[in-house]
């Protein structure tokens, strides 16, 4: 039965993407089918094999160690604020972003990350039927983040037509930056974080290939990476430390606002209608939860968490999931966890449009115009990843 529902889920995702397609006749189905097969193989490899367990365990242990290192710095500065045996969310989940941001900066500085991003991007371009720029951008988004990635392609940004710009922005919204992965791993199982990171990469190409199909001419298939202004090692360290801290503070501020707002809205709806706002959203999103392979008895609660992620952000949704964890089956937990690992929410439209606008005002306005379509596509990527995982769980 789960395979039938998964097939229906894939057809629904494809159908919803085709409805929003710019040019249905130009959709190239061969690379799309190939990438779906690759997604299923990778999900099965990571979640159902000993080799996958070794990979995920190793990945999780690396981030656990990094979080331990980060904790030593946090404890030195904020140790007296935490109660014995307890640690505030900001200290234990968000502040480690500062240390991981520093590591990313170091690997960027010694030219290791650019080589990795270009190498993987070139390999992906042979599979996805898209250009080198699009492939590089997807990998870079998953490593340096949805805002910072546009700086690396600044030289080409002003020359891109709207359709190629959409693909770049869709990749940035569909993935998550490596600096935040450690925070996710403290809230949901690491194996689902790693799996989502890998299959979202292909999911972004699949959905973009349907919603926004186009051909890149050989003369246009050029990747020009912006050279970062040369800094001393310690200048770079200072910059990435501050950048990491800004991310932690911004996420913290958004959580304060969104959690408080959601609590207030839920209370008002409960007083007036006798049902919370999240429960209403749960019913709205329950059909999507069903095609993702979630059992019928759990689709309303799952739909509520999915909707929370869309209207607030993934951190708020992950917090809700951790509170309701005992009421879900292991299969449902896995499917929802994979769905949550992306930047597909309303606030990301503003973040991406702002990042592009700071580099090229005209292109920033273009991104703002297709912002809702961008979120639509990125949400379909999350649904697609969840459907793929439902096949192997």
Image (cartoon, rainbow, N blue to C red):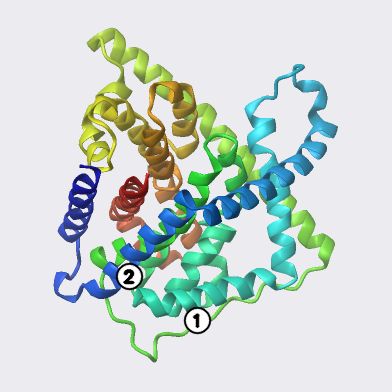
- Along the line of sight, which residue is nearer the eye, 370 or 365? 370
- Along the line of sight, which residue is nearer the eye, 45 or 231? 45
Q: Residue at x 68, y 32 (%)?
A: 92
Q: Residue at x 46, y 85 (%)?
A: 222
Question: Quarter of the image containing the N terminus?
Answer: top left
Kind of element beneath mark 2: helix
Placement of 21 over or under 331, stated as above or below: below
- Which is nearer the N-term, disc 2 or disc 1? 2
Q: Residue at x 51, y 61 (%)?
A: 141
Picture coordinates of residue 27, whole percent (x, y): 21, 72
Count of numbered tags = 2
Look at mark 1 in the image and give the residue it sits on: 223
Picture coordinates of residue 57, whole percent (x, y): 61, 48
- Along the line of sight, which residue is nearer the eye, 227 or 16? 16
Q: Residue at x 38, y 26 (%)?
A: 328
Placement of 330 over or under 165, stated as above or below: above
- Along the line of sight, which residue is nearer the eye, 269 or 354? 269
Question: Quarter of the image containing the C terminus?
Answer: top left
Label at residue 162: 2
- Quarter occupied by residue 115: bottom right
Picture coordinates of residue 250, whole percent (x, y): 58, 40
């Amino acid at each position: 039965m789960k395979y039938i529902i998964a097939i229906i889920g894939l057809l629904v995702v494809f159908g919803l993407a085709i409805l929003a397609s710019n040019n249905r006749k130009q959709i190239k189905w061969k690379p799309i089918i190939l990438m779906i097969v690759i997604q299923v193989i990778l999900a099965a490899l990571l979640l159902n094999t000993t080799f996958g367990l070794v990979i995920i365990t190793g990945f999780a242990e690396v981030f656990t160690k990094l979080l331990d290192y980060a904790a030593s710095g946090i404890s030195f500065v904020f140790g007296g604020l935490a109660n014995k045996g307890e640690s505030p969310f900001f200290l234990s989940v968000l502040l480690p972003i500062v240390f991981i941001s520093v590591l990313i900066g170091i690997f960027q500085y010694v030219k290791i990350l650019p080589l990795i991003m270009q190498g993987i991007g070139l390999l992906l371009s042979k599979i996805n039927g898209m250009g080198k720029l699009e492939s590089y951008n997807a990998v870079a988004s998953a490593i340096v983040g949805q805002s910072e990635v546009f700086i690396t392609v600044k030289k080409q940004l002003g020359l891109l037509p709207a359709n190629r710009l959409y693909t770049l922005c869709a990749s940035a919204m569909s993935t998550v930056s490596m600096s935040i992965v450690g925070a996710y791993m403290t809230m949901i199982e690491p194996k689902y974080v790693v799996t989502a990171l890998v299959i979202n990469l292909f999911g972004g190409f699949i959905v973009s290939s349907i919603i926004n199909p186009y051909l890149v001419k050989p003369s246009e298939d050029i990747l020009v990476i912006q050279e970062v202004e040369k800094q001393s090692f310690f200048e770079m360290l200072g910059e990435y430390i501050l950048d990491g801290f800004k991310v932690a503070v911004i996420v913290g501020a958004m959580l304060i606002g969104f959690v408080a707002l959601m609590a207030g809205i839920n209370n008002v709806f409960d007083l007036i209608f006798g049902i919370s706002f999240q429960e209403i959203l749960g019913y709205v999103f329950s059909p999507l939860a069903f095609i993702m392979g979630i059992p019928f008895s759990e689709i309303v609660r799952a739909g509520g968490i999915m909707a929370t992620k869309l209207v607030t952000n993934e951190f708020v949704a992950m917090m809700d999931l951790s509170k309701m964890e005992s009421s879900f089956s292991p299969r449902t937990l896995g499917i929802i966890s994979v769905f949550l690992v992306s930047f597909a929410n309303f606030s990301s439209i503003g973040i991406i449009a702002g990042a592009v606008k700071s580099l090229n005002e005209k292109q920033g306005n273009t991104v703002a115009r297709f912002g809702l379509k961008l979120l639509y596509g990125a949400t379909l990527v999350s649904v697609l990843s969840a459907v793929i995982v439902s096949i192997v769980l």
